[in-house]
Image (cartoon, rainbow, N blue to C red):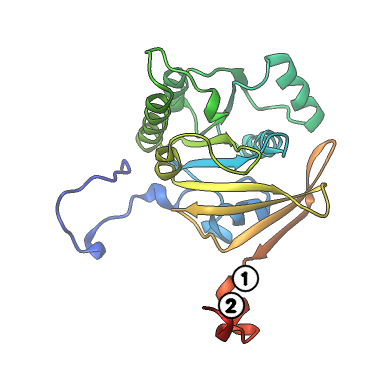
Amino acid sequence: MKMSLNTTEFVPASQIKVPSIYFHRMKTGLEEVDEFFGGKDKAGGILRGGVYMLAAGAGSGKSTFCLQVADALCKNGARVAYASGEEGIEQLAFTCRRLGVKCLPVAVQTDVDTIIRKMDELDLVIIDSFQTLSVKKPMTPRKKEQYCVRQLCAAAKRTHCAVITLCHLTKAGSYRGSTTVLHAVDALFNLHVDEDDNTIRVFTWSKNRFGPTDKDIIIGIGKHGYNWTKTEIEPIVHTSEILLNNNNLETIS
C-alpha cells in the first residue's frame, strides 16, 4: 500500500488502515542511532519513505555522520546511495577511505529529477546537500527549493525510498531559504558541536513525524569519523520540569 496524505472525507481514525510500511524500519545495527531515529527495539531505525533533513553549520560533521550511517545500512543489506554536490568524486572516495566506508555507492549528482528516477531502485538516498540541488528548467531560487522538496517528498512516498538531505546553516545558526522546505520534510534534526569539547557532537530533533523527539544522541568524533563505542542517548529535560523541580514557578512573569 502506498502512503498518502490526501483524503477529503472525515473518517474515524480507528477505521483507517495504517500501511505496513509505517512499521518497517531500516536498521543500522547501531543501537543508539536506531533508537534516536525511531525508538527502542522494533520502533527503532529509519522509516522507509520518510524524508529527513540534517541541519548544521559547515565543518561540523554532517557528511561524516551520513556516510558512516549509510555504510552501516549497506552492511545490513539496505540499498543506499550517496549523491554529493559538495565534493569531487576523488575527494569523496578519499573521505570514504579515511572513514572505512567501502560498500556505499557514491556519485557527484545534483539534478533532482535524476536522483528521483534512481529512487525506485533504492531504500535510502542521501543528498549532500539540499542547497546544491539543481533543476533543468529556469526557476527563481525560492521556486527551485519548493520544487525540489515537493518532488522529493512525493517520490519518497511513492517509492518507499527514504531520503536524508543535508542542509547548511548560517554562522548565526539559521536556515537561509524558504520555510516551505522545513515544513515539508517529515523530520528535521540538528547537529551541534559541544561547546566544551570539540570532539563531541550532539544531535537533537526539531521535529519527527514518525518517531520520538524526547532524546538527544551524543557521539564522540575523531580523525576516523564517529566512534560508535562513545555514543550515549540522553533524555531531554524540558524547561517546565526544571522549573517545577526548582520551585521557580513564581519567578515567571
Relative to 148, is 39 on the left or the right? right
Check residue 153 in the rendering and tell me which mark sits there, or answer none.
Answer: none
Residue nearest the viewer, comparing 44 with 183: 183
What amino acid does circle 1 point to?
Answer: Val
Q: Which residue is mark 2?
A: 241
Q: Work out whether residue 110 or residue 21 is closer to the camera in this orientation and state it.
A: 110
Residue 113 location, x and y as percent?
41, 19
Above or below: residue 90 compared with residue 192: above
Q: Which residue is mark 1?
A: 237
In the image, residue 23 above or below residue 113: below
Dividing the picture into quarters, in which one does residue 72 lie?
top right
- In the shown orientation, is residue 60 left or right of residue 81? right
Q: Answer few, some or many: residues within 10 Å of disc 1's Cα (few below 14, many 20 plus, some between 14 and 19).
A: few
* Residue shown at the point (72%, 55%) measured from the top left: 218
Gap in angstroms between the C-alphas marked 2 and 1: 7 Å
x%, y% of residue 129?
57, 29
Q: Is disc 2 in contact with disc 1, using a CB cutoff of under 8 Å?
A: yes
Q: Which residue is found at the position 68% from the left and 15% from the top? A: 89
